Amino acid sequence: MKKQRFAIVLDTRRCIDCKACTVACKVENDVPVGGETYRNWVTEEPVRGTYPNLGQSFTPSQCNQCENPPCNSVCPTSATGITSGGIVTVNPDKCIGCKYCMLACPYDARFYDSEKGIIDKCTFCIQRTLVGGIPACVETCPTKVRTFGDLNDPNSEVSILLAKNKHRVLKPELGTKPFLFYLI
Amino acid sequence: MSTLTKKPGYFLWFAILGACLLAAFGAAGYTFWVGHEQAFNVNRGVPWGILISTYVFLAISCSGLCMISSLGHVFGFKEFETISRRAILLAILCLIGAFGAIGMELEHPFRMYYTILSPNLSSGIWWMGTVYGLYLAVLVLEFYALMTDNHKLSKITGRIGLLLAIAAPSILGAVFGLILARPFWHGSFLPVYTIITALVSGTALILLVMYFQHAVRGIEMDEKDCRVIRLLGRILRLVLFVLIFSVFWNIIVGLYGQQPGIYEPVMALINGSLSANFWVGEILIGLVIPLALLIRKDRTPFSTMMASMLALIGMFFMRYDMTIGGQLYPLRYQTEGLANGLFTYSPSVSEVVLVVGCIAFSALVFTLVEKFLSLDLKSEHHP
Ligand code: SF4
Ligand code: SF4
């Protein structure tokens, strides 16, 4: 079997900003309550147009599990690493807490969890996905904004979605090769 | 040296520095007790605060001291040989102070051994830590050689030390310059700029040491000392002129074209949350007044010392503004936690006390060593 390469495809037009994904993530991954501790978030874009012709978009996001992750390049102790499925993880035993990775990540995906004393980030719920499950945020989304799957499998739902739809990634110019894809 | 102990100012000096150190120990204890989140004002948006900028300030000063002192014992300019011992000693102490500052900012400094067990050679911080670590070892050896008048060893260690003195601040600049996500830092400017600024801090510090080593002990400066001070004053004037252009172009490049991520931090400098630091700290105190003092024909050792002191204070602001400025621009669209579209940061009391403590440590140990060891060369022994 070919090595897996996990990705999430997001259809932001379906997002209703209910924030179920952020709550599900906090519960699943035991992320402390607090304004700065979160693995995923929903950006409320500015309102467009003038009344009564108004529109607003919501863009959920999290770690992009980049193929060329700057957070990995800068980590002095190799605490950050890339594991199976292309998931970027932090080994808490090796992390010295220099926070260089927080500065190097162009997506603000990392934060310091002072309760556990670790640098934390989204792992696509590695505890679920490595045994065939799907991430909590994907599972909980009521409007099915997110689709999770293996891009190395041409018949996976994510591969088909990307084949059939135009899509974009965030900050492609930085060369990070993100694996969160946004349908357009 | 016995004259020293009789001075009341001398006791005051020790009392103040001792109090600063004690306060810093208190702040360190408090920080370990309640955690960085409580004690420090760094946050998700601005993870690197004043302790990192102080580390930058002290570590680069250390390199500058070596560069300038190498004029004597590496390049053979006899006039400068008198300053070698003090310069290298101060360089060692600045570096230890710098390590103290960064050690306090790290969440888990005791896991540092993983930089050896599982090194990541593509990490700027790995290179910086390794080179500064080696550099400290070379400096200690160099100091030993200078104190024992071992000319062969001091020449060898001086040369290696000089190479590392140039490489180390440059790598430190690269720690910032390599961060593609932060346009205000990214590029090859910082690795070169840090070398220029190392010369400013180094020259200024040596001038201060030269001046106070005489003033405190009540020793008259002889003609040779005055000549060295004049010469160092000219070097400082030159590097400050060069620095003006670095600062000028850095600002102009940031304004020109208004590139997101560069423009906003530059505006924070000239008209935003960092503007007092920039105009008063960097420009007025750090550049304009020192230059005005240094271009005067009738400058005295005292006015040269004042210029150095101010230039050094200016450098501290410059490090701070560089470190904080690069983090102010948010990485994604957000509204919460921002003021005028930018993150804000001002150091907490604990952070400031720790910074003062690190600087006080270097100053205190320097004065202690000065008191107990003879840092004068035999040729210029003062009775
Ligand atoms: S999004 Fe950030 S944390 Fe995630 S892999 Fe990319 S650089 Fe690293
Ligand atoms: S904070 Fe930890 S994971 Fe991040 S770069 Fe430093 S050592 Fe690596």
Image (cartoon, rainbow, N blue to C red):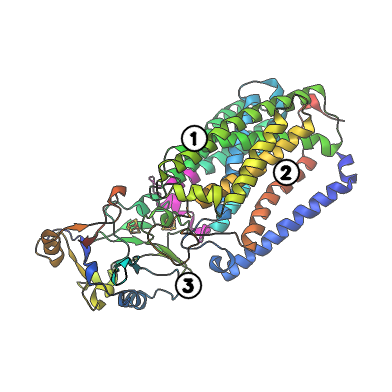
**In whole angstroms, how far apart are the C-alphas of marks 2 and 3?**
39 Å
Q: Which mark is residue A115?
A: 3
Which residue is disc 2 drawn over?
B366
Residue drawn at 42 percent across, 59 percent down = A94
Q: Can see residue B94?
A: no
Residue drawn at 44 percent across, 76 percent down = A33
Residue B131 picture location, percent across and down? 50, 41
Dot 3 alpha-carbon crowd within 10 angstroms: few under 14, some 14 to 19, many 20 or more: few
Q: Secondary structure at mark 3?
A: loop
Q: Which residues are magenta?
A: B106-129
**In whole angstroms, how far apart are the C-alphas of marks 2 and 1?**
29 Å
The residue mark sitting in front, 3 or 1, is 1
**In whole angstroms, how far apart are the C-alphas of marks 3 and 1?**
40 Å
Q: For residue B67, which quarter of the picture?
A: top right
Q: Residue furthest left?
A: A155
Q: Nearer the viewer, residue B256 or A93?
A: B256
Q: Secondary structure at mark 2?
A: helix
Q: Which chain does tag 1 point to?
A: B
Q: Which chain does tag 3 point to?
A: A
Q: Nearer the viewer, residue A169 or B258?
A: B258
Q: Is residue B325 left or right of residue B122?
A: right
Residue B108 picture location, percent across and down? 50, 61
Which kind of residue does numbered mark 2 sit on?
A: Phe
Q: Is residue A166 left or right of residue B41?
A: left
Q: Which mark is residue B192?
A: 1
